[in-house]
Image: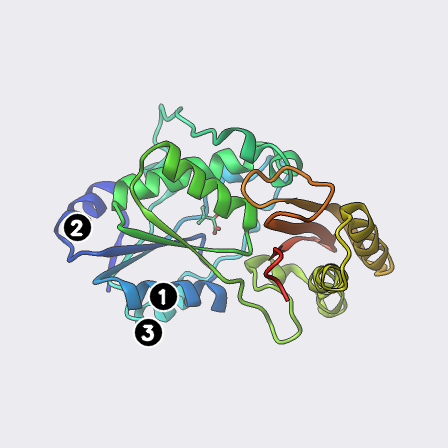
Amino acid sequence: MELITTVTAMVALQAQAPRPLGLVPTMGFLHDGHISLVRRARQENSTVVTSIFVNPTQFGPQEDLANYPRSTERDLEALEKEGVDIVFMPSTGEMYPAGFETHVDPGDIAIPLEGEARPGHLIGVATIVTKLFTITRPNHAYFGQKDGQQARVIQHINTDLNLGVTVAICPTVRESDGLAMSSRNSYLNNAERKSATILYRALLHAKELFNQGERDTSNIRMAMINLIEAEPTAYIDYVSIANLETLREIKRIDQTTMISLAVRIGEARLIDNLIISEMTE
Ligand code: PAF
């Protein structure tokens, strides 16, 4: 496994690497969700590149950039074990040198949900993913469905900017009690960790109502809110029931729908989602 820290070296290496090349972008502090992406990339590509870069432009001024968890040694060991060929781990100065000022704005799809709650976040994600795509030139790139709006934003910029990458959105990996794996789960103390299952429980409740025939989104949203508000340490940021493609809120579930939510528990702001459609059981 090669550890690359400069853009020049990464560009040179990918140009000669056996194809197809699969990219798994990460911010490090790897968990089984990331490892599932790496395994899929390993199965589908001759060269696997994983990037580790805590991207400052996707954090707001009041957010957790300085405290974002890091575990570089453990991450590198795990990636080596999974047979990754190249780890791209640039410094902030390497990715954003003096004079950097271009940003990728994905448009309407980045306005609601995380876009509203975390202004600038999705522009930061779109910018860094575009840079990672142009530096590593992947044939395939792998992202988790857990960050549902991020996944749609990346598909959207890939299409709009003709980046030419096959983007795979892979299923959310969950703990045994349903909590979606996330680096930010490490902020939770024991009591908060128990409360954190409320996100998945609320999503399952929504799905159950849907399966019982409920289609009115205000009834489903209210049932989710009531359930979450009964959990004393949980504070709702949003509960959304939106069209999967546009992420616009809908009144009735008669299209492929993403039910998503952001909830604060202690220091952690957690997100999760489920996709449902008439095919869902
Ligand atoms: O999902 C993440 O870890 C990040 O948002 C990503 C896609 C690596 C961009 O920094």
Query: Left or right of 200: which side holds 42?
Result: left
Q: Residue furthest left?
A: 16
Question: How far apart are the two marked residues, 2 and 3, measured between alpha carbons?
Answer: 21 Å
Q: Secondary structure at mark 2?
A: helix
**Label 2 – label 1 distance at C-alpha:** 22 Å
Would you say the beta carbon of the disc 2 residue lies within 8 angstroms of ligand 1? no
For the residue carrying disc 3, how many other residues have a C-alpha within 10 Å: few (<14), some (14-19), or many (20+)?
few
Q: CA distance from mark 3 to mark 1?
A: 14 Å
> Of label 2 and label 3, which has the lower sequence position?
2
Q: Secondary structure at mark 3?
A: helix
The secondary structure type at the circle numbered 1 is helix
Residue 52 left/right relative to 85: right
Q: Quadrant of the C terminus?
A: bottom right
- Mark 2: which amino acid? Leu
Q: Which residue is mark 2?
A: 13
Q: Dot 1: within a 10 Å radius of its alpha carbon, few (fewer than 14), some, or many (20 or more) residues? A: some
Residue to which mark 1 is pinned: 40
Q: Nearer the viewer, mark 3 or mark 1?
A: 1
Query: Residue 51 location in percent, x, y?
Result: 35, 53
Q: Nearer the viewer, residue 195 or 46?
A: 46
Which is more foreground, mark 2 or mark 1? 1
Residue at (62%, 57%) from the top-left corner?
278
Colour treatment of the image: rainbow
Q: Which residue is mark 3?
A: 81
Residue type at mark 1: give it.
Answer: Arg
Task: Specify whether 263 is left or right of 70.
Answer: right
Sequence-wise first label, 3 or 1:
1
Q: Nearer the viewer, residue 220 or 161?
A: 220
